[in-house]
Image (cartoon, grey):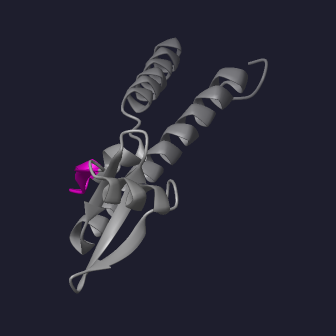
Amino acid sequence: MKMLKVFLTTGAAMALVIGCSTTPQKEDILSAAGFKMVPADTPERQAHLKSLPPDKITTVQRSGKLYYTFPDPKKNVLYVGGEQQYQQYRKLRLEKQMADEQLTAASMNEDAWNSWGPWGFGW
């Protein structure tokens, strides 16, 4: 029984470490989805970057095509992608959310196991 408890504790700790070390930011997910980083290297681009709502993906119509944009004023860049990149972003974001929820649930289960054991307090 002790071996099982050690195994579960080690597994939960490893999942927590791996989860924390690979926690991507929104910008990382956008890049992984194929969004391109466009530098705001002209006054017009800088003005456009500042005009967009912070931390929000917005749509832009240009030459009859729909683009999705995300401003990153800290890096002075604009992430730009099409419909395919946006759908990939949504998929990756959902996968990350599900992984985070699984990690939280595993952590809560581990806490409950350590507090009460498999048969309740005092056994």
Q: Residue at 48% across / 26% down in the picture? A: 12
Q: Is residue 49 above or below residue 123?
A: below
Q: Position of residue 59 (x, y in %)?
A: 38, 73
| Total labels drawn | 0
Q: Residue at 33% across / 60% down in the picture? A: 44
- Looking at the rendering, the stretch of residues picked out in magenta corresponds to 31-39
Q: Nearer the viewer, residue 47 or 59?
A: 47
Q: Position of residue 8 (x, y in %)?
A: 48, 24
Q: Position of residue 42 (x, y in %)?
A: 28, 52
Q: Nearer the viewer, residue 96 or 122?
A: 96
One can see residue 90 in this view: no
One can see residue 30 in this view: yes
Q: Nearer the viewer, residue 7 or 64?
A: 64
User: Most extreme residue toward the bottom, as rendered?
Assistant: 64
- In the rendered image, the quadrant that contains the C terminus is top right
Q: Nearer the viewer, residue 83 or 101?
A: 83
Image position of 22 (left or right of 9)? left
Q: Residue at 52% across / 19% down in the picture? A: 5
Q: Can you tell which quarter of the image residue 83 is in?
A: bottom left
Q: Residue at 43% across / 23% down in the picture? A: 17
User: Most extreme residue toward the right, as rendered?
Assistant: 122
Q: Position of residue 66 (x, y in %)?
A: 28, 79
Q: Can you tell which quarter of the image residue 87 is in?
A: bottom left
Q: Is residue 7 above or below residue 71?
A: above
Q: Is residue 89 magenta?
A: no
Q: Is residue 62 above or below residue 36?
A: below
